[in-house]
Image (cartoon, grey):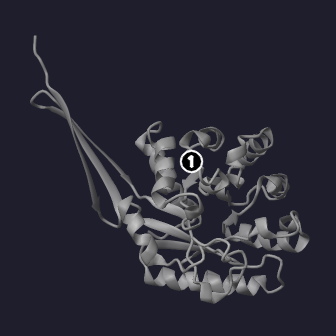
Amino acid sequence: MHKYSFFRIFIKIFIIDNKLFWWYFDVIGNNSYKIRGVIFIKIDAHQHFWKLNHLDYGWLTEELPILYRDYLPHDLEPHLRQHGIDKTIAIQAAPTIKETEFLLELYSQYEFIAGVVGWLDLGSPTFKNDYHRLREHVGFVGIRPMLQDLNDDRWIVRQEVMKNIERLISDDFPLDLLIYPRHLPVVLELLEHFPQLRAVINHAAKPTIKNGITAFWVDNMNEIASYENVMCKVSGLITEADHQHWKHEDFEPFIQHLVNVFGTDKLMFGSDWPVCLLSGTYHNVYELFENALSQDLSEKKYSKIIGENASGFYKLNL
């Protein structure tokens, strides 16, 4: 009877185009072994930059002292290095074309910014010209109307807005949806009209984590997840929890429901930095994501949520 020794050598290395190569060797006995490799890139699909002197941010006031300062790429880079994040998607935080152009300037200066989701007024008669001008920039990868801040919850289904959404659909250009749960029925109305729309729900539609999961949120997210081209970001959740006393268990039913209904092919990770600082650190957000998902998923499924899905959705040039 032969006795065989078993051990695994695990190596993580960073090479070639910022992709992550994971190699491990299973060695059995003296001459039997397996070599496996998984390649994936890590993308933070939702973060912001701003400069206060741009005066674009009506929501950003001294009443939010931790946010009321400039946040620029050099502030984010240490957090990306700490957690092995290769690329990010910079998301608009002000309803102006000027701010979108500012983010595109940063895209041109910093290699880690893989794309910009900007703002355009989908209800404007100048939308067509503004859209085509920005589309000339390779870094412009999506549009986000700030639906949560509009007085009209049904703005997205206005006739003039939907006419311009048809243009996005014809170009297969994606839409980020910044909404609260109350907007979900209106989003469903939009999707019923445009089932082929490529869209992503930001921050899981901002459920009130501190009040627990609701049937309204569950039922509406179930319906939205049934649309093939609609994804969801696992982002912005800690700011919807009790800022001072949240714990990991508060988020588990929400995140598990997202995995159950969207699946690992239609979710993407986002930090929502620096807005997340209202309730925690970049590390807190990343740790929450890791604890909720990485241990229960295969490397292949995890790699989709941490990067591949964002790359495919935004058609990134990596």
Instruction: Locate residue 1, reporting x and y percent.
Output: 10, 10
- Figure disc tally: 1
Asked if residue 97 is positioned above or below residue 20 in the image, the reply reads below
Task: Identify which residue is drawn at 86% across, 63% down.
Answer: 153
> The C terminus is located in which quarter?
bottom left
Could you tell me if residue 57 is visible in this image? yes
Asked if residue 234 is positioned above or below residue 132 in the image, the reply reads above
Instruction: Locate residue 158, reporting x and y percent.
Output: 89, 69
Q: Of residues 150 and 249, which is closer to you in this image?
A: 249
Task: Identify which residue is drawn at 66% across, 59% down.
Answer: 202
Specify the amino acid type for callout 1: Asp
Label 1: state its secondary structure: loop
Q: Of residues 104 and 79, which is closer to you in this image?
A: 79
Return the residue at label 1. Answer: 265
Asked if residue 296 is positioned above or below residue 107 in the image, the reply reads above
Where residue 313 sits, quadrant-wise, is bottom right
Q: Of residues 154 and 244, which is closer to you in this image?
A: 244
Instruction: Locate residue 276, reporting x and y percent.
Output: 57, 62
Task: Identify which residue is drawn at 85% across, 56% down.
Answer: 186
Where residue 124 sits, quadrant-wise, is bottom right
Could you tell me if residue 166 is visible in this image? no
Binning the other alpha carbons within 10 Å of mark 1 as few (below 14), some (14 to 19) or many (20 upward) gives some
Identity of the residue furthest to the top in this view: 1
Asked if residue 33 is positioned above or below residue 177 in the image, the reply reads above
